Amino acid sequence: MTYLIRGKVALLIKVVVVALLASVLLLLAQSAFAQREYVIAAFLAISVAILALTYLSKISIPLKFFIPGILLLTAFVIGPILYTVAMSGFNYKTGNIISKEEAIVQIKVRGIEPAPSGLSFDIKLGTVDGKPAILASDINTSEYFLSTLEGRTPLVASSLTFNEYGVAIVAPNFIPLNETEFASADKIYTGARFVFDDQFFIALEGFEAGVVSQQVLEFVPESDQFRNLLTGDVYTDNGRGNYALADDQGAILEPGWRAPIWFENYSNIVTDPRVREPLIRVFIWTVVFALLTVLTTFALGLLLALALNKAIRGRRIYRSILVLPYAMPSVMSILIWGGMFNTEFGAINALLGTDIAWFSDPNFARVAVILVNLWLGFPYFYLISSGSLQAIPSELMEAAAIDGANPRQIFRKITLPLLLQILSPLLIASFAFNFNNFNLIFLLTGGGPRNELDGEIAGATDILISYTYKIAFGSGTQDLGLASAISLIIFILVASISLYSLKKSKVLESFA
């Protein structure tokens, strides 16, 4: 009886938890659907069905433990990867961010220009019969009128109330906006076109001035074109996310929209010298940086591990001190080192008695990056080398010593090969990590130095990931499509190098 009651209580709790979680996910799915994020909405809806089927039935006991991880892996790993792959085939950059429908609306709004007369008016925002209206004043000609979205009504000065500047603020049937209404006025009045005459309208510039303007660009939905009403030029969809002139593809209307260009971003990496040349330089430095980091940190960590592997006085204290750089947050360490490398006030130049511009010269900046990463990385290799040295049977070294091998030969022929066999996966992982060590580059040098006057994006210390970040977010033109393509190449490179290294080291064979 007690077991039955507990079973019912557990079932009730399970149903309640699943119901609450499903409610939250369905609410998020509804919000995503309302914002036209159909893929996200579908994923959330499917997740609800999978959770209900898994936990409210006996379909599979192991699945109850795996399904949360599977869903999170799909949402936060597989999903972003697939999105990056998809966006790498799009013209997705500054000026081509929004959808085509939104771009058409924006072009219409921007496709106006002031009338040749150059007329402008001081205005007061308000309503007439509950509809948006403006009370316009020309203090030079003493012309006053009410204008709505449907018509215009001239006014006489005797029926108006003016402020100290001679601008009309009160008129018959006109109700000015109060402070509360002003808070939401931007959505209603910005972009509105108040009637001036049959050809021109009044476009607002802020909430206190209006300019007599005319529509220059007209959208023709039947042919999916924009026509310039003054010149007769026709802009058509160029298939790359912009409306452009047929005889001059460089003459485009902005903004554009995200449009598929398939493999053009990848071809630009190879064919466009503005992309190819800095990318090659950055790639070479990335490989050199990752290799030097692994070699220097491993060498120093192993050297310290060998030195402290022997019984010496105060060994525990030395070990604790060596671990301190690893225990300290890397962000803080990087910022401190950045201050120490300061040309004028840094401790390093003060100690050396020099005035080296560490972050202004490419070579010195690279040396600084390697030194700081050495400081951050050697404690890790010291710890794993210490553990690995203790795992090597001492009988092997004793037998080699009996056979006449000296300490150098023992290290070269026995200790180092065994260490490399044990630590190969960690060395490969360290290489892959430093291949994408964004924090160090971004916080220490910002990727510099670079020649900003020539429009260079890639700096002397930029690695692939920081260079990709600048392409996506750190320059005047944010090219998210090209950055996605480079990100995919980085992923393929790191995966290929790691798999090749693992294969050559025969690490995986030991698990077969």
Image (cartoon, rainbow, N blue to C red):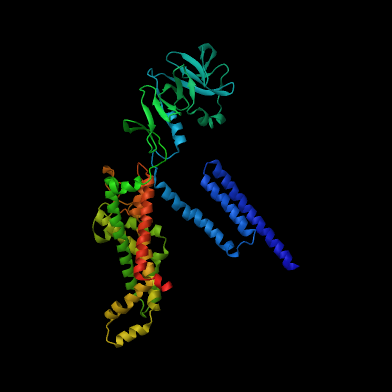
Is 411 left, or right, of 180 in this rendering? left
Camera-side residue of 489 and 148: 489
Is 86 left, or right, of 341 in this rendering? right
**Residue 279 higher or lower than 11, as above or below:** above
Quarter where residue 223 is shown: top left
The count of marks equals 0
The residue at the far bottom in this view is 402
- Counting from the top left corner in percent of width and height, residue 167 is at 48, 19
The quadrant of the rendering that contains the N terminus is bottom right
- Counting from the top left corner in percent of width and height, residue 282 is at 29, 53
Camera-side residue of 455 and 91: 91
**Residue 373 higher or lower than 199, as above or below:** below
Is 453 left, or right, of 189 in this rendering? left
The quadrant of the rendering that contains the C terminus is bottom left
The residue depicted at 36 percent of the width and 55 percent of the height is 490
Residue 19 appears in the rendering:
yes
